[in-house]
Image (cartoon, rainbow, N blue to C red):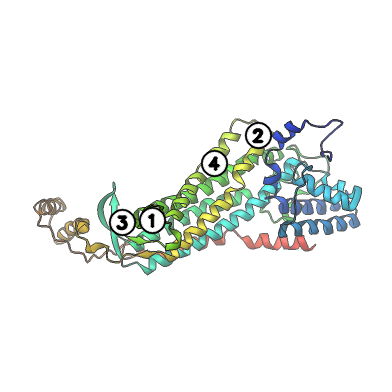
């Protein structure tokens, strides 16, 4: 068994090692290529302050590029006798370059190393989530425009209430995603700050150039106070968890609506057949399994910030091993959310709408408010108009006028989808993903 980087003159009991390492090797595979990027920036800075020779830097960078390529093509592994991704990368360098590989850890701790890995990972994942949200958003806007003139019942208390439309229904979830994107942007901006150089949370006696590593890794700024940088472990994940939960909340609500509207009692929409399953006993069944799973997964994701909070909320300042457990609930959450977003976008694109819902007379009463408003517009006091229509309904004399004319902003006749799209585009443009691309490309080619 290889010695741990931190090991002294004794070996750890294997059962204790199993318990303390937990799922770290599995979780650290999410972070592998970001650990390499962080190391590339760190050693470039070390050379600039005289802690590495120029030829050493070039050899280390060349080997780190090879390791990065193995992370990209899926061949990178954390060996059974290696504790974590940081140890694996350092061991690979040492095997190839000898003692030179042992120099890369000067001026940093595994604490700030995992912090920068997490931030680089989160930054990329938030970008992919934002892109997946935009795909779903576009499908919703397209459907809203396509069916803007198709009326459907609106409900309060699950009772037929007033006229709505598929333009409004699809568009409502599109606009919900614009607000969710603001949470995502806030999480991104808090994430995109450099903790590298904070070491174990108390800085270093080496004359580190933290501004340099900030620029090399494309961060907007750094976590300046080294104690606060370490305090960001857990807090960052919790804040990002809230952004994930916000998007998941929109997905869960939309999925519930779709399951309801797909049922025979409603028959408002028809889901793509490949997104439904049959019954082993009832030949007529077409169950909305994909939306049901989206709903369940999204509801689980809404618990993420609470899970993280309960792990970290009573920890004082400094690092504690408790924080390792956050990775197990946090790192896989991005794939789950992106999967739900992609499935939702597919279903929305292929969903079919019933354009003849209002042929059923049970929906006639949803036009009662329209009649009250018509009478009020003709001069009858509103309360008198309300009473007259109510009495007509009770007496069975109410006849709906189904041609409605709503013109104010955000109504059936004025969806404001262009304005909603501009809000989304404005928020997306403020992420400035291109800055990250330029920095990382330059680092990999240096």
Going from the N terminus, do you reach mark 3 or mark 4 first?
3
Going from the N terminus, do you reach mark 1 or mark 4 first?
1
Q: Residue furthest front?
A: 281
Q: Mark 2 and 1 residues: CB-CB less than 8 Å, in contact?
A: no
Residue on which the image places disc 1: 258
State which mark lies toward you, 1 or 3.
3
Residue shown at 65% from the left, 40% from the top: 233
Residue on which the image places disc 3: 264
x, y percent for residue 121: 66, 51
Callout 2 crowding tier (Cα within 10 Å): few <14, some 14–19, many ≥20 = few
Residue on which the image places disc 2: 322
Image quadrant where one finds the N terminus: top right
Q: Residue furthest bottom?
A: 146
Callout 3 crowding tier (Cα within 10 Å): few <14, some 14–19, many ≥20 = few
Going from the N terminus, do you reach mark 2 or mark 3 first?
3
Residue shown at 87% from the left, 31% from the top: 9
Q: Which mark is residue 305?
A: 4
Asked whether residue 194 is in view, the answer is no
Answer left or right for 319 relative to 295.
right
**Residue 381 occupies which quadrant of the picture?**
bottom left
Answer left or right for 182 relative to 270.
right
Asked whether residue 176 is in view, the answer is yes
Image quadrant where one finds the C terminus: bottom right
Label 2 to label 4: alpha-carbon separation: 16 Å
Label 2 to label 3: alpha-carbon separation: 49 Å
């Amino acid at each position: 068994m290889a010695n741990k980087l931190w090991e002294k003159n004794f070996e750890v009991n294997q059962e204790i090692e199993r318990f303390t390492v937990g799922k770290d090797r599995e979780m650290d595979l999410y972070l592998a290529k970001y650990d390499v990027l962080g190391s590339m920036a760190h050693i470039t800075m070390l050379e600039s302050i005289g802690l590495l020779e120029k030829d050493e830097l070039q050899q280390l960078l060349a080997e780190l590029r090879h390791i990065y390529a193995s992370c990209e093509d899926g061949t990178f592994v954390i060996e059974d006798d290696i504790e974590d991704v940081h140890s694996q990368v350092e061991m690979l360098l040492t095997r190839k370059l000898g003692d030179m590989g042992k120099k890369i850890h000067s001026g940093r701790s595994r604490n700030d190393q995992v912090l920068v890995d997490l931030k680089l990972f989160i930054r990329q994942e938030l970008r992919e989530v934002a892109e997946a949200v935009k795909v779903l958003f576009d499908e919703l806007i397209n459907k809203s425009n396509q069916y803007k003139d198709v009326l459907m019942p609106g409900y309060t208390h699950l009772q037929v209430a007033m006229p709505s439309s598929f333009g409004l229904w699809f568009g409502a979830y599109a606009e919900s995603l614009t607000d969710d994107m603001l949470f995502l942007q806030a999480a991104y901006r808090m994430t995109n700050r450099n903790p590298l150089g904070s070491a174990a949370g108390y800085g270093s006696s080496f004359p580190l150039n933290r501004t340099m590593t900030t620029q090399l890794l494309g961060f907007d700024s750094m976590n300046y106070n080294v104690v606060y940088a370490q305090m960001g472990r857990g807090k960052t994940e919790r804040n990002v968890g809230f952004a994930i939960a916000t998007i998941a909340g929109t997905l869960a609500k939309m999925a519930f609506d779709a399951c309801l509207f797909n049922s025979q009692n409603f028959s408002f929409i028809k889901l793509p057949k490949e997104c439904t399953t049959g019954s082993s006993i009832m030949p007529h069944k077409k169950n909305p399994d994909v939306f049901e799973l989206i709903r369940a997964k999204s509801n689980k994701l809404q618990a993420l910030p609470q899970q993280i909070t309960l792990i970290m909320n009573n920890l004082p300042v400094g690092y504690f091993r408790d924080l390792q457990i956050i990775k197990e609930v946090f790192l896989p959450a991005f794939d789950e959310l992106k999967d739900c977003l992609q499935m939702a976008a597919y279903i929305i694109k292929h969903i079919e709408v019933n354009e003849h819902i209002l042929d059923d007379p049970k929906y006639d009463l949803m036009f009662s408010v329209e009649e009250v408003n018509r009478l009020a517009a003709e001069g009858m006091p509103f309360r008198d108009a309300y009473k007259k229509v109510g009495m007509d309904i009770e007496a069975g004399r109410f006849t709906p006028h189904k041609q409605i004319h709503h013109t104010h902003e955000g109504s059936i006749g004025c969806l404001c989808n262009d304005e909603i799209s501009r809000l989304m585009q404005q928020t997306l443009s403020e992420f400035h993903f291109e800055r990250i691309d330029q920095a990382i490309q330059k680092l990999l080619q240096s």
